Amino acid sequence: MSIKKRFWLALLLSLPMLYDMLAMLLAWPMLPNGDWIALVLTTLIMLISGRAFIQSAWAAFLHHHANMDTLVAVGTLTAYLYSIGALMHHQGVFFESAAYIIVFVLLGQYLEDKMRTQASQATTKLLELQARQATVIRNGQTSEIPIEEVEIGDRLLTRPGEKIATDGRIVKGHSTVNESMITGESMPIEKQAGDLVIGGTLNQTGILEYTAEKVGKDTMLAQIVEIVRHAQSSHAPIQKMADRIADVFVPIVLMIAIAVFAIWNVFLDATLTRSLTFAVSTIVIACPCALGIATPTALMVGTGRAAKMGILIKNGEVLETASHIKNIAFDKTGTLTQGQPVVTDVIGDPKQVLTLAAALESLSEHPLADAIVKAAQKQAIALPDVTEFLNRAGQGVTGQINGHQVFVGKPQLASQPLDKEWQDQIERLQEVGKTTAAVGQDGLIIGLIAIQDAPKPFAKPVIARLKQQGMHTVMITGDNKRAAKAVAKQVGIDEVIAEVMPGDKAQQVKKLQQSGVTAFVGDGINDAPALAVADVGIAMGSGTDVAIETGGIVLVKNSLKDVVKALVIAKKTFARIKLNLFWALIYNLIGIPIAAGVFAHWGLVLSPALAGLAMAFSSASVVASSLMLNAAKIDD
Amino acid sequence: MLKVMILLIAVILIVAIGWWFFGHHQEKAMTARLNNNGQDQKVRIEVNGGYSPSTIVLKKGVPAELDFYRKDPSSCLERVVFPEQGINEQLPQNQLHQIEFDTSQAGEYEFACGMNMFHGKVIVK
Ligand SMILES: [Cu+2]
């Protein structure tokens, strides 16, 4: 029988006893033969709604285990059996205690069950994103097939308003795609041939043809679900303490309850009924179920909420460590910066300088050439023809444009020595970490182009936020000191560790760890060792397999803002776990002495039924407290 | 005289509880049975007031199946959680529920009930 049914039945059957209790207080007419009615009703409740507790408790007992079912079973059985004995001897009974303990414990379990289902919805919701069908193109024909039958290399088609079936690369078409469900990115993203698409996201405006690159459990969605599921069933280290307490708790409570009974009856001369009431209340209020669910429920809600924002937290341990980070180190290229050099300044007549430079560089293969060509494309500049193109290794490139001799590269390519004004400009640009190329015509320099791997948007405010939270920010990079320092200055980072070989990043993270808990933020493949060594590895963006495997936290979206968000969520969730554990413990620490009758002298006592109610609400309140994480403010 | 008796019984009960729950009561580990000429291995675990057996030994590299059979009606044992494997499954009452277990890496893996009160261990070697 379900908990729900057991609860409603117990409640209905206990109503006459509730009436009798009220009647006694308010001097209404009492039920005739009230004690006998109570006996019949309580027996029914014990048999129908309470039997499961006794069964479980007995099975556990045989395994030398005791749990909350033990407490409920011992508590209700004591009250019930004692009352039967008392009825035979025409003494006061307290059947209703047994009945109400069962009602309230079931109420607590029913609420808890309901809320737990709600808390674990994150993975279910993610799984619902999965497309059920895919439109496959075979031999020029389209056909619908179940998603399970899609194979790598299949050519798939998605119409506007349809879900993208699986991870792949676009071959044909142009559209905007809403990826918010996976990456948390709220803006629709424009996609065309060559771009990657993620299975489960929503195609909005155009028809897309793409080849499947990942299927089944290798897709990003499947991996996200897997990580969330892992995280939700993991335990935070702090939980171990709670477990240890719960393990020894129940037997100790039983011992205390016996001692309570003996002390009241033998030394304080209380009646048998009164002594038993104290003992039963003690047993009932001590149920440690709130302690048991304090961590798992908070973890579920916290990691589930994070996943919705595109932040995957691997397990409870990461969450706990992430809430006391001292150093946070960033990889530079691609993490703090865009990862691609771009033209930042053009000095001289911008149009002329860029036109000539781009025309020449469009024939070059230098990595920086690409940046210049792109800058010209962006301004829709038409490139003139170049003749006599020459690549002078280590110097730059030269050629003829419209009858003029033109060059791009080192200032030494000019026929005259560099004058002071250009020299100053170049030095100023280099000071801030920019690479400069001189552009000249007929032996004279006519302008400069500065190129830099620019910091990402929000790099500066994000670093500021982290510093504000008391973290020491570090940048680890293979770049030369000057360029690294310049970027560090732009974004406001505290410490720069430059000229680090890719393999030594992990070593540097280890060094930082000597001064405290260290997080490392990197974008995957070559950062993997550092991500693994760090106390908290935060892998950014792109969802490469290596990143997903080595990072403790994975940011699906390539946004620095999510670093702050992730740490805020981790902190809030961990704080909630601590709060839950604190309340669960303090509740017992206060409740047990009251139930045992320590304060009886001052009139403060707890009937077994009230104890049952209180304990039911303690577990329900822990779950409610965890659910409140869903409403906690996470700003970026 | 009655009071002395009550006191005596109380003391005996307290000692008995201590012995029953805190004394050393080791359960034997159970080694999985190999089937189909060592192609796979299976263990049946009864869930009733705990897991019996609660320690299961699996052979490394052989696909394994853990068959949970839950008799216990308590809501606590309703789920079984293997934190390291990310397995968190509902066990239907009075039905066999199969869980596949990855034995590619040797080690000791703990599992527990949904509330982490009952514990068991899988040893892969
Ligand atoms: Cu439990």
Image (cartoon, coloured by chain):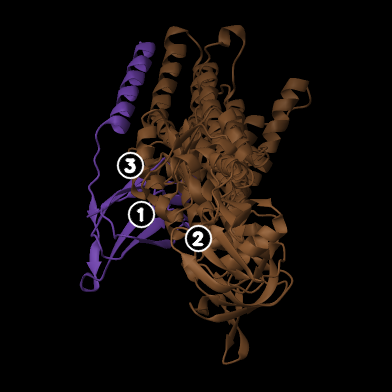
Q: At which x and y percent is residue A33?
A: 67, 31
Can the viewer see residue B101?
yes
Q: Chain of mark 2?
A: A
- The structure residue drawn at horizontal position 69% and vertical position 77%, both measured from the top left corner, is A207
Please tell me whether mark 2 sits on a helix, a strand or a loop: strand
Please tell me whether mark 1 sits on a helix, a strand or a loop: strand
Cβ atoms at labels 3 and 1 below 8 Å apart: no
Q: Which mark is residue A396?
A: 2
- Residue nearest the observer in this picture, A502 or A593: A502
Can the viewer see residue A554?
no
Cβ atoms at labels 2 and 1 below 8 Å apart: no
Q: Which chain is brown?
A: A
Q: Amino acid at mark 2?
A: Gly
Above or below, comparing residue A531 to residue B2 in the picture? below
Give whichever of discs 2 and 3 has the lower sequence position: 3
Q: At which x and y percent is residue A265?
A: 45, 13
Which image quadrant for residue A201? bottom right
